[in-house]
């Protein structure tokens, strides 16, 4: 009697699951190996593997961190160029701002003297001050400051019933201020007839950067249209 050999039934479900389990086990072992802390001093690693492991975990290698001489020279060169360009420009900005502030202060004080003359109905004088700041001094410099006071007799001297209205301290060092006269007197109408002229501000940059204001006989200020000289 012939024996019948029966084929083992093919299980499609097992054939599908086994590769999946194998792949799962394979990637799981790879993940564990990847996250495992590698000791770069392990003698079983090749030199290149040790170096790679040391870099990976943030340890020092045979070469210390730092700058090379060429990198340092390039950095110094860039810094030198930056300072050469930036410092003069920054200094120019400071001087321009200082000059603008000083002009605005003069304009405000001239406006104050004029308005006080109109309000009080009597002459008011703005003049170069003495060291004490309590009277005029024709020999002083405008850059040393000025005072504003009511000047009933228009003599340019703080006396009698005159009242001191404002005292201006000296300007910043290195700044000069010139004017054709030693004082400006406004009458009760706010006019400064006979005291017209040009206030000129100068600093270390000379005439090329000079700025000023022109005072008219009507007591008003305007910007100059002609070039200014610091001499």
Image: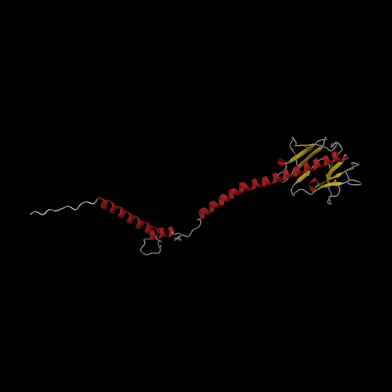
Residue 225 vertical position relative to residue 50 in the rendered view, above or below: above
Tell whether 62 sits left or right of 80. left
**From this viewpoint, is residue 185 visible?**
no
Look at the image and tell me in which quarter the N terminus lies.
bottom left
Q: Position of residue 24 (x, y in %)?
A: 33, 54
Residue at position x 77%, y 39% in the image: 213
Residue 79 vertical position relative to residue 223 in the rendered view, above or below: below
- Residue 208: image quadrant is top right
Residue at position x 75%, y 40% in the image: 212
- Residue 231: image quadrant is top right
Q: Position of residue 43 (x, y in %)?
A: 37, 65
**From this viewpoint, is residue 86 visible?**
yes
Which of these two is toward me, 10 or 187? 10
Which of these two is toward me, 66 or 84? 66
Tag count: 0
- Residue 149: image quadrant is top right
Which of these two is toward me, 35 or 147? 35
Tell whether 41 sits left or right of 99. left
Residue 112 vertical position relative to residue 60 in the rendered view, above or below: above
Q: Position of residue 55 (x, y in %)?
A: 43, 58
Which of these two is toward me, 159 or 4? 4
Residue 225 vertical position relative to residue 201 in the rendered view, above or below: above
Tell whether 199 sits left or right of 4. right
Tell whether 14 sits left or right of 180. left
Residue at position x 87%, y 41% in the image: 120
Q: Position of residue 29 (x, y in %)?
A: 35, 58
């Amino acid at each position: 009697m012939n024996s019948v050999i029966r084929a083992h039934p093919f299980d499609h479900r097992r054939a599908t699951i086994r590769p999946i389990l194998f792949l799962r086990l394979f990637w799981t072992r790879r993940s564990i190996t990847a996250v495992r802390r590698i000791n770069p001093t392990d003698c079983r690693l090749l030199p290149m593997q040790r170096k790679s492991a040391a870099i990976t975990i943030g340890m020092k290698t045979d070469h210390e961190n730092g700058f090379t001489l060429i990198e340092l020279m390039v950095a110094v060169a860039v810094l030198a160029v930056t300072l050469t360009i930036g410092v003069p420009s920054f200094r120019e900005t400071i001087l321009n701002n200082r000059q603008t502030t000083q002009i605005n202060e003069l304009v405000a004080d001239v406006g104050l003297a004029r308005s006080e003359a109109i309000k009080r109905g009597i002459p008011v004088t703005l003049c170069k001050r003495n060291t004490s700041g309590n009277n005029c001094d024709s020999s002083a410099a405008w850059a040393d400051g000025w005072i504003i006071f009511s000047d009933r007799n228009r003599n340019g001297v703080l006396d009698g019933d005159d009242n001191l209205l404002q005292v201006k301290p000296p300007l910043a060092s290195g700044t000069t201020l010139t004017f054709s006269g030693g004082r400006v007197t406004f009458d009760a109408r706010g006019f400064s007839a006979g005291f017209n002229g040009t206030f000129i501000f100068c600093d270390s940059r000379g005439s090329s950067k000079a700025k000023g204001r022109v005072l008219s006989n009507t007591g008003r200020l305007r910007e100059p249209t002609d070039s200014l000289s610091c001499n």
